[in-house]
Image: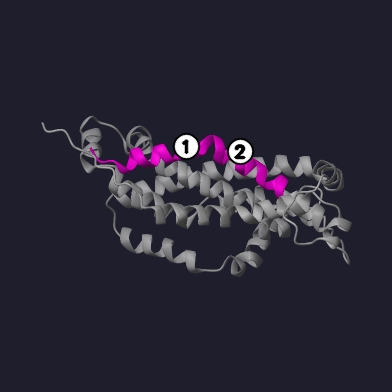
Amino acid sequence: MRAKVIRRTQASPAAYVFLIVVLLASAFPLWWSFVIGSKDAAAIVQDPYSFVPGGHFIQNAATVVTTVPFWKALGNSIIVSTTVSLLVVLFSAMAGFAFAKLRFRGRGGLLVFVIATMAVPTQLGIVPLFIVMSKLGWIGSLWAVIVPSAVSAFGVFWMTQYLQEALPDELIEASRVDGASTLRTFWSIALPAVRPGAAMLGLFTFIATWTNFFWPFIILDPGNPTLPVALQQLQAAYFVDYSLVLNGVVLMALPLIVLFVFAGKQLVSGIMQGAVKG
């Protein structure tokens, strides 16, 4: 057998300049939030366009923690984001396996219908969803945030496309010859094959759930909020202390930054392994 030769192309200087510009533009809002969040209100008024951080970040952070139920909201956000991410990955992988590798009547039309639901604005379903949560007695409960988000049309589409390319039909046929059931085939063959795509879907879902404000603000009580809902309480009726608000934004973004630092390399390597066809 002849070994495959992988050729690496060197990026041009213009590509590096473009990537640096994109990196700086992406990091600027967080840096600006840190700069404003490290000052007091008087310093912001005196020099609102300064890019030099102040010396009040820890003091402002302590004020944020004591003003809103920060630790309660942090725990709720971790529970909700982690649970929703796991459920979305599991259910999307199961549905994607069915759409990609199983043959049943109406498969194509049903997949189109699932994808079409992404075109429906979330706001249109708020009233009936609130009524359902009220009937179930879940108003103010984290279940009202977790359960409606447990399935994602985008996740189903993502996993369907990934499994069509990453999982050969020969493996499924071999498992059936060995007597494996459909569920056993999914758990032992499909799920390991889709791991890189599942990691990315889980990351995207975690970020979207962590920063979600609209539905938790409607359904949760002020004493049992997620982080975005809790930070909203920093805004007074007639005065907004932007140093505290943006300090809270930085505190809310820190767990996501830590997640990217520790998981980013593994996610990229997993995607590269899934993209290489042997």
Amino acid at dot 1? Lys
- Quarter containing the N terminus: top left
Q: Position of residue 163 (x, y in %)?
A: 33, 46
Q: Position of residue 210 (x, y in %)?
A: 63, 49
Look at the magenta stretch and give its main secondary structure.
helix
As for residue 151 lying within the magenta part, the answer is: no
Q: Nearest the camera: 128 or 193?
A: 193
- Quarter containing the C terminus: top left
* Labels 2 & 1 near each other (Cβ < 8 A): no
Task: Say which residue label 1 marks.
Answer: 265
Q: Which residues are magenta?
A: 249-278
Q: Position of residue 10 (x, y in %)?
A: 32, 47
On screen, residue 269 above or below 114: above
Task: Say which residue label 2 marks.
Answer: 258
Q: Nearest the camera: 69 or 126?
A: 69
On screen, residue 274 above or below 29: above
Q: Residues within 10 Å of mark 2 (few under 14, many from 20)?
A: few
Amino acid at dot 2? Val
Q: Nearest the camera: 114 or 181?
A: 114
Q: Residue furthest left?
A: 1
